[in-house]
Image: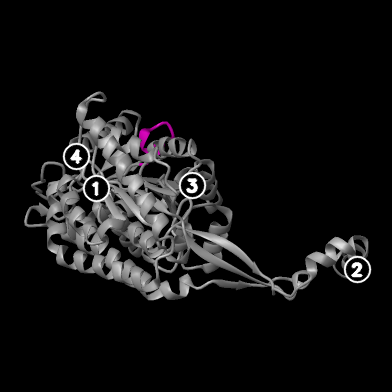
Amino acid sequence: MVQLSVVSRAESPEISSAIEALQAEFTRLKRQYANTPYPSLTHRLQRLTQLKQALLRENEALIAAVNQDYGFRSRFDSGLCDLLPTLNHLNYTAKQLKKWMKPQRRHAGWMLLPSRVEVQFQPLGVVGVMVPWNFPILLSIAPLITAVAAGNQVMVKLSEYTPATNQVLARVIAALGDIAVCVQGDAKVAAAFSALRFDHLLFTGSTAVGKLVAQAAAKNLTPVTLELGGKSPVIIADDADLARSVDNIMLGKTTNAGQICVAPDYVMLPQAKVATFVELYLQRFARRFIRHGRMDVTQIINQAQFDRLQHCLDDAQQKGAKLNTVVGKTVELEARQMLPHLLTEVSDDMLVMQQEIFGPILPVIGYRNIEEAIERVNQGPRPLALYVMTKESHLANHILQRTHSGGACVNDTLMHVAADDAPFGGIGESGQGHYHGIEGFKTFSHSKTVLRSAAWLPRSGWLLTYRQSMLRVLTRFFGR
């Protein structure tokens, strides 16, 4: 296992030795894959069992470590939204793996009879996984699970912003033995990591950094899966139950204090309901999250992110937005805790409407009709998620068919990410490629088409000897 310390100077001896160690481990994994290019089902399931045992053993240590890295992180966020989905993903993958590994029979077509065609799923080799800070357990271990299930060797680059969590994750990943390498280091190590000749590279993080990773990978023609973000909108139709819509949005916006790639980024609803929505949201938030003068909401990860969010609020107010937050409650906030800030009267020149917010700020925009809301979605980059609140399925379908997004929920938020049997991924600037489900298994596998012909079959001889006759016969039967 490799663990690389954070360094800050490009020419320092530490960075040189770290990158040399990185390359050495990559080379070792390449050789190891060459010696075992197709691990058996038993071998893969054994590795997953070892990983599960480590996760269960380190359960409390992981929760405590993430809390340390954040300053305060709600146990709900760490337990229900980070650790539990990871275990569910592992259990689901282990249950499905035998079926996924089986070659798929395909129709050969009449021209190729009596040959048979199948698709085999072959491990790619060495897979790289680059992990963000916001859900360090799920976003490191879930892709690791799928990559190992597909038979690969794996290198995992953990975020430098979660050092305490990384120490525990290193122990968890060590349970996989010599097929997995855990890498720690700063942005320079990450750059070197993304430049390795991986057989596949998965990156989760911002669009800006994702572009740099894609550029580095392109030099080696390394295929990439990019799980990015964007401004995931909510459209509340006129017929929607407003209180339930508020609850759905609040769940998405309070989970990890909105520091989640599929968090609702802005809300659109009929203009006449904007004030009621804002009032309901703040009332229900205060009732649920503020107890005895304390707020049970995760802190912003670090001061830089907190300052960025505050700058967005200042920018919006300077440009005419109206800020709405909890009033009438005495709350003692931790250092980087942030109350919800709902912004009305926003304009497109504000930072909150130009950038992914990634925090507890929520622009609320009134529309005159549903087509206006659809048009606003389509004017921007395609988001990672779209949320529709309505009782009418035909209206939901109309919105879904007229917009593009990585995924979507109707009368819910976030929950599509937890569907283990369905792909998760972005589109356009919100990402490319998928993982989760069999789509994830295929992402980390090579789908190899194999045609099997009997040893006695004289087809090639016929095609060589009777070229014109064969062309006429085949054209007569198949060329129309």
The dominant secondary structure in magenta is loop
Determine the secondary structure under disc 1.
loop
Determine the secondary structure under disc 2.
helix
Residue occupying image coordinates x 39% and y 56%? 33
Determine the secondary structure under disc 3.
loop
Q: Pointer 2 and pointer 4: residues touching (CB < 8 Å)?
A: no
Which residues make up the magenta segment?
347-356
Q: Nearer the viewer, residue 273 or 220?
A: 220
Front label number (3 vs 2): 2
CA separation in Å, label 2 and label 4: 72 Å
Front label number (1 vs 2): 2
The kind of residue tagged 2 is Val
CA separation in Å, label 3 and label 2: 42 Å
- Residue 299 placed where, x, y %? 17, 47
- Dividing the picture into quadrants, the one containing residue 354 is top left
| Residue 230 seen in the figure | yes
The kind of residue tagged 3 is Pro
CA separation in Å, label 3 and label 1: 39 Å
State which tag comes first along the sequence, 1 or 4. 4
State which tag comes first along the sequence, 3 or 1. 3
Q: Which residue is mark 2?
A: 473
Tell me the number on the disc at residue 340.
1
Tell me the number on the disc at residue 302.
4
Residue positioned most to the top: 11
